[in-house]
Amino acid sequence: MLIRSRRRSEATRGEVTPRAIYDRRREFLRAGLGLGAGLALGVSAWPAPAGAALRGMALEYEPSPFSTDEALTSLDEVTTYNNFFELGTGKSDPHRHADSLVTDPWSIRVEGACENPGNYALEDFVNPWALEERIYRLRCVEGWSMVIPWIGFELNRVIEQARPESRARYVAFESIHDPENLRGQRRGVLDWPYTEGLRLDEAMHPLTILAVGLYDEVLPNQNGAPVRLVVPWKYGFKSIKSIVRIRLVEEQPPTAWNQSQPGEYGFYSNVNPEVDHPRWSQATERRIGAFRRRRTEMFNGYGEEVAALYEGMDLREHF
């Protein structure tokens, strides 16, 4: 069992939102809505909840030993300061235009080099596995970071159910493509749909999760509803949102930002303070809600858990 301890470079609880406020909010929701011991992800505090596939489902979860004990970023900042280019390139655009993301009905296709491909309705995709609350840092390439209480399950459970063939070496992900409703996809900012990929051992790592909620709620549209990837040791753009397809493949798959600007966004995109973006330093970061900058940690502070995945690799070349 891996439990991360607080590092000297991490925030104190007084710098961001106190955990006690979050806990009181949880108690208020359960008391006011009569949810009892389970968590019902059915009433959203945000203007754009996920579709009916999850609304009303009683989803119980347990806290995870993988969680950091850092102070949480405020609920308001988590849901109003976002990167989601399908909904616009400004940080406030995803929240303002979240209603245009249609999440009901929703299905996910699992396919490729596997023995058990299939189409999964969202409720079928979530129900078989117990959910956990994973409090992870999300570090964005622009130099800012958040600490978010995600609710989800390990991606490796989906991959194991698909039964990968021996030739499968990578996992490719594809997001929703709906330019009629998603204004960002009517612009040539990226080659739509958004795609991402991981090496198979990265995808199987227990830190890698599929999230369906945060802060006791169904995942809001602006944060990637109804299901998104979270890979906490990589820059945030690797954590693809609104997933509709997962493929097991032999060759390294093309990914949206690497295709668009390969000199700036590598396939691996591990958080690395020693590899700068061509237009800014990655040596420091600013936690949203705090004022002082802090030193960026290698692998976003998860080096003890994931550094062995890259043993012998030149992480300046394979950035």
Image (cartoon, helix red, strand yellow):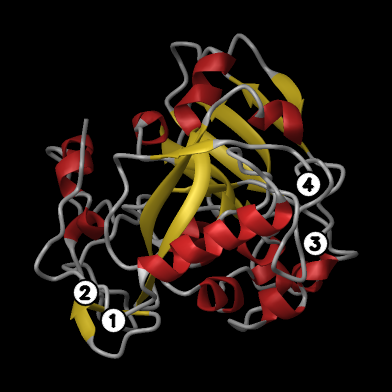
Q: Amino acid at mark 4?
A: Arg
Residue bearing mark 1: 15
Image-based side of 210 in relation to 293, left or right? right
* Residue identifier under label 2: 12
Cα distance between the residues tagged 3 and 2: 36 Å
Q: Quadrant of residue 45?
A: bottom right
Of pointers 2 and 4, the one earlier in the residue sequence: 2
Circles 1 and 4: CB atoms closer than 8 Å: no
Q: Are marks 2 and 1 in contact (CB under 8 Å)?
A: yes
Mark 2 vs 4: CB contact within 8 A? no
Q: Earlier in the sequence, mark 1 or mark 4?
A: 1
Residue 310 position (above or below residue 139): above
Q: Assign a secondary structure to mark 1.
A: loop
**Is label 2 in a helix, a strand or a loop?**
loop
Q: From where the camera sits, is residue 72 visible?
A: no
Q: Nearer the viewer, mark 4 or mark 3?
A: 4
| Residue at the spot 21% in from the left edge and 57% down from the top edge | 301
Residue 179 found in image quarter:
bottom right
Amino acid type, mark 3: Leu
Residue designated by label 4: 55
Quadrant in which residue 144 is drawn: bottom left
